[in-house]
Amino acid sequence: MSGISGLSRRVALRHLPRRTVRLRLTFLYGGLYLVSGAALLAVTYILVHHAVSSQVVSGQTLLPPHDGGGLQPGGVPGPGPGSSEGAVMDMLPPEAAEAMAHQRSTLLDQLLIQSGIALGIMSLISLALGWIVAGRILRPLRTITAAARDISATSLNRRLALQGPSDELKELGDTFDDLLSRLEASFLAQRQFVANASHELRTPLARQRTLGQVALSDPEASVDSLRAAHERILVAGAQQERLIEALLTLTRGHAGIEVRQPFDLGQLTREVTGARTQEAALRSVALRVRTEPATAAGNRNLAERLVVNLVDNAIKYNADDGWVDVSVRVMAGHAVLTVANSGPVVPPEAVERLFQPFQRLGTARTGGRRDGLGLGLSIVQAIAAAHGARLTTVARPEGGLITTVSFPVVTTHRALNGNGAMPVRTG
């Protein structure tokens, strides 16, 4: 029997109306009106009861008052000042007192009954009005819900474009439109990145396969020719490894940093530039370095990759007998890294495109070489964003770029976290 009763209870609950926000708002409006009406009815009843009792005490209900008290017509003594209702009723004949009490009781009962009926009717009307008003208020939410249900990754170009006053619901709709815009841009960038990465990875793979097929199809292949083919295959494999490592670094930069540790940006920059002095000399580029102790916070390995990419980019895309200036200084508590270099003229409108993955500005800037992966500045931007650093790049009118990375101010705390690293707060 308990199983049957439980089943019937579940069936009954299934047929109940769904507890939507509109239904809850409707009952909230109705409940508030019911409580307010009941309170108003109670106050009205008390006031009427007091008014009727005051009229009885003053003798105005059934008998006209007599100046100064004394006897009423018919020899009935009138109420004096300060007389109570009981005293007045005792002065009246029993029939008059009973009629007066009956009239007052009937009046109050009729008031209570009619007010209760009116309250019930108005409560039902308030529920209906609450249902209508809640529906009108929640209409933008239904529009947002329907749009969110219909929008997919292939239809992110749709927008709500809610009309009406600038209230909270319109602000919610505008925020949803902004979110769709960011998602659309993110999906487009992701698809473009996947396409570019697939193309970049397919090129060395195709080269490896071609070299292997040519070496195997040669019936007169010698040890030297096979060795040369394998060396070229290894070179293509090394290019793949560099590309995959760059992609992993880019992914780590986008993922953010969980534990931030302080490090000396000046010392880090001196280490990076010291290891590239020979390469700069081979390319006939004068490398000038000026650093001072500057504390930054974050992941030192990622910060090192940021400095490496900026310095390598400045040395690689330079002019004959060019120069690279690298400086680290402290400005208003911020550790600031600046890398400036000579080189081909970069159009100001093309600077932003340099930070997009696999984007190059053609042979005018690269000198016909293609020894880069097209990910260096994209990795710099991702690592700077992960550190909360401000990255700015401007094109020099004479040629080359000036790139500045300003790390947040570091405030160290005395306590150490569970990993033994000093937690820092950046601002």
Image: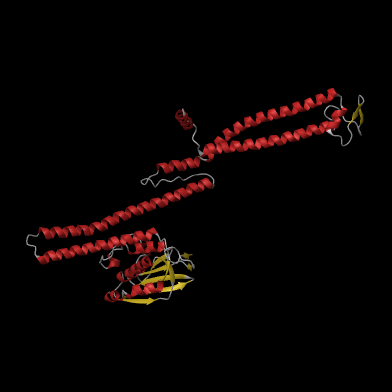
**What colouring does the structure picture have?**
secondary structure
Q: Please give the count of numbered marks on the rendered protein.
A: 0
Q: Quadrant of residue 151?
A: top left
Picture layout, residue 285 above or below residue 44: below
Extreme residue toward the left, this view:
220
Q: Which of these two is toward me, 328 or 181?
A: 328
Residue displayed at 60% across by 37% down: 31
Picture layout, residue 14 above or below residue 356: above
Q: Which of these two is toward me, 311 or 258?
A: 258
**In this view of the protein, can residue 321 be seen by the observer?**
no
Give the left or right position of residue 210, taking residue 189 as reference: left
Q: Quadrant of residue 246?
A: bottom left
Extreme residue toward the front, this view:
1
Residue 360 x %, y %: 30, 62
Q: Which of these two is toward me, 215 or 189?
A: 215
Residue 173 x %, y %: 48, 46
Q: Quadrant of residue 355?
A: bottom left
Residue displayed at 36% across by 51% down: 187
**In this view of the protein, can residue 379 be seen by the observer?**
yes
Residue displayed at 27% across by 68% down: 367
Picture layout, residue 115 above or below residue 184: above
Residue 281 x %, y %: 28, 77
Residue 40 x %, y %: 69, 36
